[in-house]
């Protein structure tokens, strides 16, 4: 049975997929059998045959070097670049929790570590019609520990603190924060790191610079985050 970690963000385009690729790259470098999973993926393009390509999954596979087949990585792939619940309304094929859990559980039997990436921020609805499925329903169904990815720039104090407070209020465990697009020479970025740690009591575990190719976090510390 695998050890797992859930990657969420303070919003869309915070760099969750980029950071997840760096995380899986480290597992690959240490010879661990690691996998990637995402319940639903929107904003994808089609190949020459008209088949939807799960862009985030392909990026993570290529950037990390993991051998996991892309077909195992995401059960719901949509073309429209909106929240999965709306994409399904426009395109059909709404998210079924049973299917999401079956896909994840299948990976747990094959891999040592599974890194699960969320869609958008922590409040992302996966389905909202006759059934209502939220991202946190998936998190709680498999009792994931979570890591928050945040942009290091202006506005991150508000978005980080609100995300942490929501997660704590909803009994979603948070292990720490990773800052993306971090510039150590930028006074704002350094102060944001300090203030986020002070206001949440969480550690900023790593700071990822622009175009960073490796995660500045020891493998031992990274491994400890997975349960």
Image (cartoon, grey):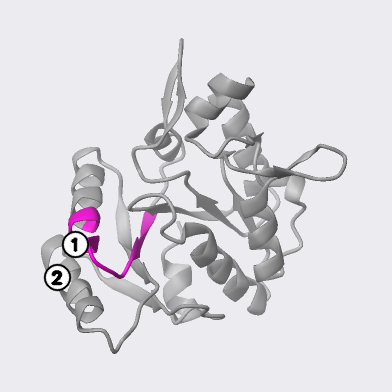
- Mark 1 packing: few (<14 Cα in 10 Å), some, or many (20+)? many
Task: Tell me whether the residue at label 2 lies in contact with that at label 1, contact meaning CB atoms closer than 8 angstroms.
Answer: yes
Say which residue appears at 70% left-offset and 56% top-offset: 58
Mark toward the start of the polypeptide (2 vs 1): 1
Say which residue appears at 64% left-offset and 56% top-offset: 35
x and y percentages locating residue 192 in the rendered image? 20, 72
- What residue did someone put label 2 on? 195
x and y percentages locating residue 42 in the rendered image? 57, 40
- The answer, for residue 1, to whether it is visible in the render is no
Residue 86 lies in magenta, yes or no?
A: no
> Count the marks: how many?
2
**Dot label at residue 50:** none
The C terminus, quarter of image:
bottom left
Q: Quadrant of residue 151?
A: bottom left
The local secondary structure at tag 1 comes to helix
The local secondary structure at tag 2 comes to helix
Say which residue appears at 53% left-offset and 65% top-offset: 18
- What residue did someone put label 1 on? 157
**Residues in magenta, as a range:** 146-160
Q: Quadrant of residue 178?
A: bottom left
Residue 156 lies in magenta, yes or no?
A: yes
């Amino acid at each position: 049975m695998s050890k797992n970690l859930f990657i969420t963000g303070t919003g869309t385009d915070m760099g969750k997929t980029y950071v997840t690729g760096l995380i899986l790259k480290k597992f690959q470098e240490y010879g661990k059998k690691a996998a990637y999973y995402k319940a639903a993926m929107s904003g994808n393009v089609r190949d020459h045959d008209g088949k939807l390509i799960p862009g985030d999954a392909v990026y993570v596979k290529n950037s990390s070097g993991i051998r996991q087949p892309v077909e195992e990585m995401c059960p719901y792939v949509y073309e429209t670049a909106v929240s999965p619940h709306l994409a399904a309304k426009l395109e059909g094929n709404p998210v079924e929790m049973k299917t999401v859990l079956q896909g994840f559980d299948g990976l747990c039997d094959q891999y040592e570590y599974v890194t699960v990436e969320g869609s958008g921020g922590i409040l992302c609805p996966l389905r909202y019609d006759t059934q209502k499925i939220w991202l946190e329903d998936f998190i709680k169904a498999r009792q994931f520990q979570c890591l928050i990815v945040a942009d290091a720039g202006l506005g991150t104090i508000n978005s980080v603190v609100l995300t942490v407070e929501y997660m704590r209020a909803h009994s979603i465990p948070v292990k720490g924060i990773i800052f993306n697009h971090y510039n150590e020479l930028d006074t704002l970025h350094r102060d944001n790191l300090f203030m986020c740690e002070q206001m949440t009591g969480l550690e900023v575990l790593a700071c990822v610079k622009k175009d960073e190719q490796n995660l500045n976090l020891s493998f031992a510390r990274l491994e400890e985050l997975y349960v």
